[in-house]
Image (tube, coloured by chain):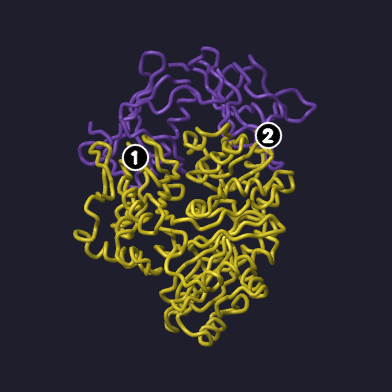
Chain colours: A yellow, B purple
């Protein structure tokens, strides 16, 4: 492997470019017209414009990416996350033209991308799953029968869903019809796969996931991440290890993830997502066959560069030696271009001055540059602020300080909300669950004058510059 | 005129402005301009106004252009500072057209393989010095076995062919430069 093509944008493209350069590899960024002046393009060895801004014509354009790889002489492709990272067609196309796909095999991606198949496969391997429908539901009548059997609340899921889309929680039988119509429709339109299944819903559960690495023969876990701070199933704050988990739960989680990964001969970095109920029992939700946004918290606790490990495994290397871990505590907060006080309305547009935090124990993964544009065409993630410390409290205090340093002139971000989460008594005690962000968000919109963090100014224009900070 | 008064989180407005700015970016490349000044603002009575000052060599060659909210949004660099140049000269991959500031560059409309001939046995579509009319094919970009003819966007004389036959081109890459015929006043 000599030259890697990055088939992604934003902070993850920057992350991959840096890892490649650290490994002495050349790296070329395939970018859209909109990202011509992006940070990843600036830092890379080379760049290739694959199309106009809209993702269907650029970042999801498989032929353009294959032409790009041929033109720049790349022998490997890193898909990042999102876009084509979990598209078995892209992985297979790369394999077909002799490009090394830095990730799992197309077959694995296809298998785990089908949530119904993955659930059945994991159950077969002895990984705990929630009671629910054994396969796709035929109609709402069958959904009702299964829901009655497992007990409400239940959750309806699209077989091909992901990224927090195509799921609906149903509190009681009265809401089932409406939820069924909604999910059946979105499954078809969003994912082109109308199959829907159902599981018991775990109330006040925690979202805990286990990072795994496999080389096709051996597998290893790299501990847990708690991602319970979520708004509409979108993660906002993640940490490793997971706080206040019973030792027995940790063992069960790690054992289940390794068993699941081994059963499919997993290659590359992957994540097993679980919901943990109040009794500490973990249940498999899904497996992500890619690099995860929140991978840095694992990297610091286990002293491993996950992107470098993926590249190494893709070129035939074995698993890295596992450092004794976890060491200390690590937390990540996602700075997004959205306005929590206005129902998380996207806040795209021109950006003036940018200041990103630093200092001991702080890492920032971001593509944000001063005097640039945040395009409404792409994901709202602007920066990941990562802090670590020898204890959870040290990491939390440091992250709170670092998030407060963020300044993005011209658009509104969620840094004020992130600070409110980090400062909340439940989060500080590590006793929060998946409802915390929703509760704080609801307070924000019902009492805008008191609940809104004091310095989160709603709207600014370049003619009246205001620094948006979370202090 | 008030400077940029569009709220930065007014997504609808930003999306409407993007095609205009993208068009501007294309103009910069195609005309080989030295500098472009953008002024965004509000008119008396509430209308939005976008002024583009295009500078080739020393003098301004373009007056104000109004935002018209055309077709598909496609983003481009939009500098919030009203006096800053948005882009300068042709981008990498678009070689300067030998001191021809008025030359029009025909760019690749998609990623694919550039062919100078309709079929391997036929003569090239255009050579340097050829006269072309608007719509005359200057080459083909093949993607997924589909042949996409690339038309001349202006009538004139071919100044340069920038890409050798059978080479993969990126989106927006300069294919040929044309010196436009003078337009009757």
- In the rendered structure, the answer to whether residue A414 lies left or right of residue B108 reads left
Mark 2 or 1, which is nearer the eye? 1
- Is residue B43 or residue A35 the one in the foreground? A35
The residue carrying mark 1 is A355
- Mark 1 lies on a secondary structure that is strand
Image spot of residue A416 (x, y percent): 29, 53
In percent of the image, x 62 and y 79: which residue is there?
A: A134
- Choose top left, top right, bottom left or bottom right for residue A264: bottom right
* A333 relative to A263, above or below: above
**Residue B142 visible to an observer of this rendering:** no
In percent of the image, x 49 and y 66: which residue is there?
A: A208
- Is residue A1 or residue A98 the one in the foreground? A1
The residue carrying mark 2 is A73
**In the rendered structure, the residue with mark 1 lies on which chain?**
A
Image spot of residue A103 (x, y percent): 64, 52
Q: How many marks?
A: 2
**Residue A142 visible to an observer of this rendering:** yes
């Amino acid at each position: 492997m000599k030259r890697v093509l990055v088939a992604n944008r934003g902070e993850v493209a920057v992350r991959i470019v840096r890892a490649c350069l650290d490994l002495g590899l050349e790296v070329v960024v395939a970018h859209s017209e909109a990202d011509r002046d992006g940070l990843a393009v600036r830092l890379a060895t080379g760049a290739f414009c694959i199309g106009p801004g809209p993702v269907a014509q650029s970042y999801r354009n498989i032929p353009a990416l294959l032409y790009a790889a041929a033109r720049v002489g790349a022998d490997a492709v890193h898909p990042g996350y999102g876009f084509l990272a979990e598209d078995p067609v892209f992985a297979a196309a790369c394999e077909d033209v002799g490009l090394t796909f830095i990730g799992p095999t197309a077959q694995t991606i296809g298998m785990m991308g089908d949530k119904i198949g993955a659930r059945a496969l994991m159950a077969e391997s002895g990984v705990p799953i929630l009671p629910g429908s054994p396969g796709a539901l035929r109609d709402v009548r069958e959904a009702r029968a299964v829901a009655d059997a497992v007990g409400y609340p239940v959750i309806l899921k699209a077989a091909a869903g992901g990224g927090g889309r195509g799921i609906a929680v149903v509190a009681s039988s009265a809401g089932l019809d409406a939820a069924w119509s909604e999910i059946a429709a979105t499954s078809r339109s969003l994912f082109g796969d109308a199959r829907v299944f159902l599981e018991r819903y775990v109330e006040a559960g925690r979202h805990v996931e286990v990072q795994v690495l496999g080389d096709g023969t051996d597998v290893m876990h790299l501990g847990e991440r708690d991602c319970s701070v979520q708004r509409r199933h979108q993660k906002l704050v993640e940490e490793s290890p997971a706080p206040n988990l019973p030792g027995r739960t940790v063992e069960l989680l790690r054992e289940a993830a390794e068993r699941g990964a081994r059963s499919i001969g997993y290659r590359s970095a992957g994540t097993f997502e679980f919901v943990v109920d109040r009794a500490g029992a973990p249940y498999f939700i899904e497996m992500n066959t890619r690099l995860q946004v929140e991978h840095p918290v694992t990297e610091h606790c286990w002293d491993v560069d996950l992107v470098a490990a993926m590249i190494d495994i893709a070129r035939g290397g074995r698993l890295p030696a596992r450092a004794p871990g976890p060491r200390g505590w690590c937390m990540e907060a996602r700075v997004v271009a959205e306005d929590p006080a206005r129902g998380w309305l996207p806040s795209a547009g021109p950006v003036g001055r940018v200041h990103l935090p630093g200092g001991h124990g702080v890492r920032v993964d971001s593509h944000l540059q001063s005097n640039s544009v945040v395009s409404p065409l792409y994901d709202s993630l602007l920066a990941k602020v990562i802090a670590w410390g020898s204890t959870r409290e040290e990491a939390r205090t440091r992250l709170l300080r670092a998030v407060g340093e963020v300044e993005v002139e011209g658009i509104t971000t969620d840094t004020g909300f992130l600070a409110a989460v980090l400062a909340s008594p439940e989060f500080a005690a590590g006793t929060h669950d998946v409802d915390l962000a929703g509760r704080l968000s609801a307070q924000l919109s019902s009492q805008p004058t008191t609940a809104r963090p004091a310095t989160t100014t709603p709207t600014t224009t370049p003619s009246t510059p205001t620094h948006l900070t979370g202090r | 005129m008030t400077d940029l008064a569009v709220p930065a989180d007014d997504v609808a407005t930003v999306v409407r402005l993007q095609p205009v700015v993208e068009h501007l970016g294309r103009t910069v490349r195609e005309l080989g301009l030295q500098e472009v000044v953008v002024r965004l603002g509000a008119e008396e009575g509430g209308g939005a106004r976008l002024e583009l000052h295009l500078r080739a060599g020393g003098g301004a060659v373009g007056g104000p252009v109004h935002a018209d909210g055309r077709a598909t949004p496609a983003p481009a660099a939009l500098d919030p500072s009203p006096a800053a140049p948005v882009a300068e000269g042709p981008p990498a991959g678009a070689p300067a057209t030998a001191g021809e500031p008025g030359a029009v560059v025909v760019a690749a409309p998609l990623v694919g393989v550039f062919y100078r001939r309709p079929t391997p046995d036929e003569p090239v579509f255009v050579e340097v010095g050829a006269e072309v009319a608007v719509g005359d094919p200057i080459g083909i970009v093949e993607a997924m076995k589909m042949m996409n003819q690339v038309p001349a966007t202006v009538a004139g004389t071919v100044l340069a062919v920038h890409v050798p036959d059978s080479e993969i081109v990126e989106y927006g890459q300069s294919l040929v430069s044309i010196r436009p015929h003078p337009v009757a006043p």
